[in-house]
Image (cartoon, grey):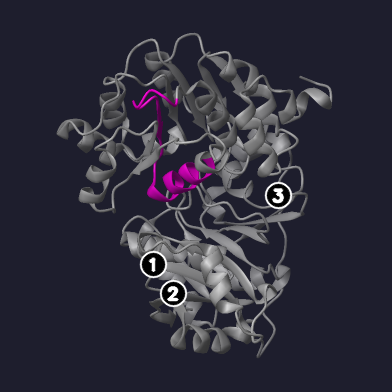
């Protein structure tokens, strides 16, 4: 597939309804992972692929599994296993979008942090596609509420992180519930030996696809600076002052460091939120929404917690802690410099970590040089993020859709569509990004209004 025509979705030998959904989603040109894997996936072959978040891998496997579905057979025919609830929700949303023209297709998410009784109700009639996390999938298998003997397509998404999180045994237990003649698609952002071993255990002659590192970081300026432990936060502030990113993900290697650094940044006047595995699911959801809504400028996170987060216009990635794994470094910085935009990666390095720098130089096949930072401007204050996020206590269970919220906010002349940003509708609550200058107006409208004849309870959370 090298010609322009053959890298278009319209060239794929798939059911007409899927092409209709792709057109509706304005998917025209395939990404490298999509074009390189399409023939194997649609041909029913196993695939072992290295692909990072934002590469288009979800559409690659979603097209394949949807194309194979027998809609008239009310059995679970596809299973996608993800490391986190956040990634599961994103994957399920993408599959639903591409299945929009396939009438009566049922897609269910089964993740921890969600009520079990709701999931049991959704499984009374078998869905066609199940997306979920290993722990919750295993629980449903043990309860006998999830049946996998009819699964034709099994997908392991972000497989490396699932292994990092200790899910190997749960994953193998789940796979034991499927038949051996299934198609198995394994996607991993990095390519450690553990992935190769798992592939050998669960795949049959997989087609191997690997996106080369230089394709990933071509538009990213990489900056390295020295920082001793007792100067690290000061070095971070100087880096932000020197390069002035509009927003950034700041990576730490440990959960306690994430929380401590986030508190330090807030005390310095920065608009920051923390994201790590010890937070309650509601807190994790809210942190992701606030950052995606541009209601906070800095997300301080661990690698595992940030998996599945896809921000197209990310000003910078800052490695507060240098990861010892070069592939993890590459995956981190690959979150910036997307959609044709320039990106920046800033890495703080302790002098004792030069052996990791040497390993990174060898991996990247480039010389790493260190930069000087200027001190923060005296008296300078951090600008406010462009939006405010409003929480309303109504969601999908109340039959609320994003269009209903937009309609309620723009019914008068005080707000326009341009004042409203991203809207996230969850089962019982919804988040709305509003232009910061119009937040009070939006609160007044919601306080005195109704959506679908329901009185609204709203509060500004950031």
| 3 or 2: tag closer to the N-terminus | 3
Query: Which image quadrant: the N terminus?
Result: top right
Q: Is residue 88 magenta?
A: yes
How crowded pointer 1 is (Cα within 10 Å; few <14, some 14-19, many 20+) is rated as some
Badge 3 marks a residue whose secondary structure is loop
Foreground residue, 18 or 39?
Answer: 18
Q: Which mark is residue 338?
A: 3
In the displayed structure image, the side of residue 69 where residue 406 appears, left or right: right
- Give, as a single range, the part of the protein colored magenta: 71-94
Camera sees residue 234: no
Of the residues tagged 3 and 2, which is closer to the observer? Answer: 2
292 up-or-down from 436: above or below: above
Alpha-carbon distance for marks 1 and 3? Answer: 30 Å
Q: Which mark is residue 429?
A: 1
379 up-or-down from 110: above or below: below
Tell me if label 1 and label 2 are in contact, CB under 8 Å: yes
Foreground residue, 54 or 271?
Answer: 54
Which residue is located at x 67 percent, y 88 percent? 378
Foreground residue, 180 or 417?
Answer: 417
Which residue is at the far left? 143
Determine which residue is flagged by label 2: 391
In the displayed structure image, the side of residue 263 where residue 19 appears, left or right: right
């Amino acid at each position: 597939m090298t010609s322009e025509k053959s890298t278009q979705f319209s060239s794929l030998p798939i059911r007409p309804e899927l092409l209709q959904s792709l057109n509706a989603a304005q998917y025209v040109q395939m990404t490298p992972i999509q074009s390189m894997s399409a023939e194997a996936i649609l041909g029913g072959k196993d695939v072992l692929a290295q692909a990072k978040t934002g590469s288009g891998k979800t559409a690659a496997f979603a097209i394949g599994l949807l194309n194979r579905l027998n809609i008239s057979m009310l059995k679970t025919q596809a299973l996608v296993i993800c490391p986190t609830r956040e990634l599961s929700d994103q994957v399920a949303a993408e599959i639903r979008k591409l299945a929009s023209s396939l009438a009566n297709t049922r897609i269910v998410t089964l993740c921890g942090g969600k009520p079990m009784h709701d999931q049991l109700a959704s499984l009374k009639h078998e869905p066609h596609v199940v997306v979920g996390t290993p722990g919750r999938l295993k629980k449903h298998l043990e309860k006998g509420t999830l049946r996998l003997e009819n699964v034709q397509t099994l997908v392991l998404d972000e497989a490396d992180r699932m292994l990092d999180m200790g899910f190997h045994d749960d994953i193998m237990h789940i796979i034991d519930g499927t038949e051996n003649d299934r198609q198995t698609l394994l996607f991993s952002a990095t390519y450690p030996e553990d992935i190769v071993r798992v592939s050998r255990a669960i795949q049959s002659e997989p087609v191997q696809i690997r996106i080369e590192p230089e394709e990933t970081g071509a538009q990213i300026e990489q900056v390295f600076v020295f920082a001793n432990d007792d100067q690290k936060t000061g070095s971070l502030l100087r880096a932000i002052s020197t390069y002035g990113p509009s927003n950034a993900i700041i990576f730490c290697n440990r959960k306690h460091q994430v929380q401590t650094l986030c508190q330090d940044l807030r005390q310095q006047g920065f608009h920051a939120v923390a994201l790590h595995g010890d937070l309650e699911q509601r807190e994790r959801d809210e942190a992701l929404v606030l950052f995606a809504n541009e209601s906070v400028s800095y997300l301080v996170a661990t690698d595992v917690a940030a998996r599945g987060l896809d921000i197209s216009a990310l000003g910078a990635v800052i490695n507060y802690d240098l990861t010892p794994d070069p592939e993890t470094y590459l995956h981190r910085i690959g979150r910036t410099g997307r959609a044709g935009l320039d990106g920046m990666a800033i890495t703080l390095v302790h002098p004792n970590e030069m052996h990791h720098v040497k390993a990174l130089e060898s991996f990247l096949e480039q010389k790493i040089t260190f930069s000087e930072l200027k001190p923060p401007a005296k008296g300078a204050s951090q600008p406010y993020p462009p939006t405010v996020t409003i929480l309303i206590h109504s969601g999908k269970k109340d039959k609320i859709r994003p269009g209903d919220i937009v309609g309620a906010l723009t019914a008068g002349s005080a707000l326009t569509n341009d004042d409203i940003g991203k809207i996230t509708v969850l089962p019982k609550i919804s988040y709305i990004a509003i232009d910061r200058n119009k937040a009070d107006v939006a609160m007044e409208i919601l306080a005195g209004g109704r959506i679908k004849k329901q009185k609204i309870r709203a509060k500004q959370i950031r």
